[in-house]
Image (tube, helix red, strand yellow):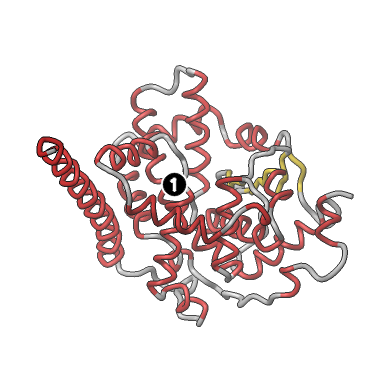
């Protein structure tokens, strides 16, 4: 029996049994994280940024890049992975997506997914994702990727992956200017994930489902061998613990990553829920497409505050760790 048959046989699936509130005409800035906006603003201020992207696009063009992503994948539809297609339709409906984007499944064991493209965005699900996740967890992952497309992230995400591959191959076009752009793209890419975790949550409208999916994407385990509560405790310990060296390594470990660590994403999502914004959106209190975005200065101020708070937390944790280290050092002389 195939995995897709497993999803359709027997009792109604999770997404059939649980209705979603359709977020009609929801604007993407309703779920976008302030740090995502701040990082994108910083990215666009890099003097060579647009020039490098234009040069790369002019050199390669969109079609070969799109074909490279789609070469080893199967397009999902009513007769190809029909249950995945049904889940995808539900996600599109809940987020009231402007259109249906091509969805592919690639034979890859790693539990992951991605949204790519330029003028014609598309989504790729790894086969490992389809096999390991429940219907609702898969719907969260799909909703997360829809969020990237609706938030206009796909152009920069595509270029991030593209530049990483070129750099790894030692391609001569990736000089100092392009490498500077790549560093900035990676910083923004990590922040953009925080936005789309929110979009995925709004798709399934169940925080536990989202955190279970993150647990599986972090560790790859089945439900009967993992504990969501233990994972949440782990996230809290990571945020709060560590000495000075730990705090520095936490930053350094992220510098080359396209995604923030899952324990950080769990913490960020819980903070957003506790802020009340998630419940307000489900009550229908959100910006609609076509309405003006929040005032530029207010939006920028919120973004700056997000970065400032993050920096303050880091400085405070480093100061606390340094103080503990100093105390321990002095105590060693007293013994």
The residue nearer to you, when weighing 96 against 53, is 96
Q: Quadrant of residue 140?
A: bottom right
What is the count of numbered marks? 1
Residue in the image at 38% along x and 72% along y: 275
The crowd level at tag 1 (other Cα within 10 Å; few <14, some 14-19, many 20+) is: some
As drawn, which residue projects farthest toward the front? 335
Q: Which residue is mark 1?
A: 260
Residue in the image at 86% along x and 54% along y: 79
Q: Quadrant of the C terminus?
A: top left
Left or right of 84 on screen, residue 2 = right
Q: Quadrant of residue 112?
A: top right
Q: Where in the figure is residue 283, as x and y percent of width and height?
A: 50, 82
Disc 1 is placed on an element classified as loop
Residue in the image at 44% along x and 21% along y: 173
As drawn, which residue projects farthest toward the bottom? 283
Q: Where in the figure is residue 224, as x and y percent of width and height?
A: 68, 56
Left or right of 146 on screen, residue 304 = left
Left or right of 84 on screen, residue 271 = left
Q: Where in the figure is residue 329, as x and y percent of width and height?
A: 15, 37
Q: Where in the figure is residue 196, as x and y percent of width and height?
A: 50, 57
> Is 152 situated above or below 60?
below
The residue nearer to you, when weighing 265 against 46, is 265
The residue nearer to you, when weighing 333 against 203, is 333
> Is 312 situated above or below 62?
below
Left or right of 2 on screen, residue 60 = left
Residue in the image at 14% along x and 44% along y: 327
């Amino acid at each position: 029996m195939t995995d897709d048959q497993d999803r359709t046989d027997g009792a109604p699936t999770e997404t059939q049994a649980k209705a979603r509130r359709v977020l009609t005409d929801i604007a993407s800035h309703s779920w976008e994280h302030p740090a995502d906006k701040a990082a994108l603003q910083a990215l666009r201020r890099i003097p060579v940024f647009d020039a490098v992207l234009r040069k790369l696009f002019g050199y390669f063009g969109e079609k070969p890049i799109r074909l490279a992503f789609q070469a080893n994948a199967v397009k999902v539809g009513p007769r190809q992975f029909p249950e995945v297609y049904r889940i995808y339709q539900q996600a599109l409906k809940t987020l009231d997506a402007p259109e249906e984007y091509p969805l592919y499944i690639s034979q890859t064991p790693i539990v992951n997914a991605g949204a790519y493209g330029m003028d014609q965005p598309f989504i790729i699900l790894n086969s490992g994702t389809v096999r390991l996740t429940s219907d609702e967890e898969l719907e969260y992952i799909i909703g997360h990727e829809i969020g990237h497309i609706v938030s206009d992230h796909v152009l920069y995400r595509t270029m991030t992956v593209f530049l990483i591959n070129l750099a790894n191959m030692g391609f001569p076009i990736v000089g100092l200017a392009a490498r500077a752009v790549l560093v900035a793209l990676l910083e923004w890419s990590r922040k953009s994930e925080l936005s789309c975790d929110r979009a995925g949550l709004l798709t399934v409208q169940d925080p536990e489902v989202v955190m279970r999916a993150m647990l599986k994407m972090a560790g790859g385990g089945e439900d009967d061998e993992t504990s969501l509560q233990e994972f949440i405790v782990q996230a809290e310990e990571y945020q709060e613990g560590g000495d000075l060296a730990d705090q520095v390594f936490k930053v350094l470990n992220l510098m080359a990553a396209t995604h923030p660590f899952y324990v950080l994403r769990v913490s960020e999502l819980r903070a957003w829920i506790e802020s009340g914004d998630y419940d307000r959106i489900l009550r229908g209190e959100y910006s609609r497409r076509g309405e003006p975005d929040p005032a530029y200065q207010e939006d920028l101020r919120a973004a700056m505050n997000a970065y400032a708070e993050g920096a303050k937390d880091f400085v405070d944790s480093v100061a606390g760790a340094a103080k503990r280290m100093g105390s321990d050092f002095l105590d060693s002389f007293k013994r």
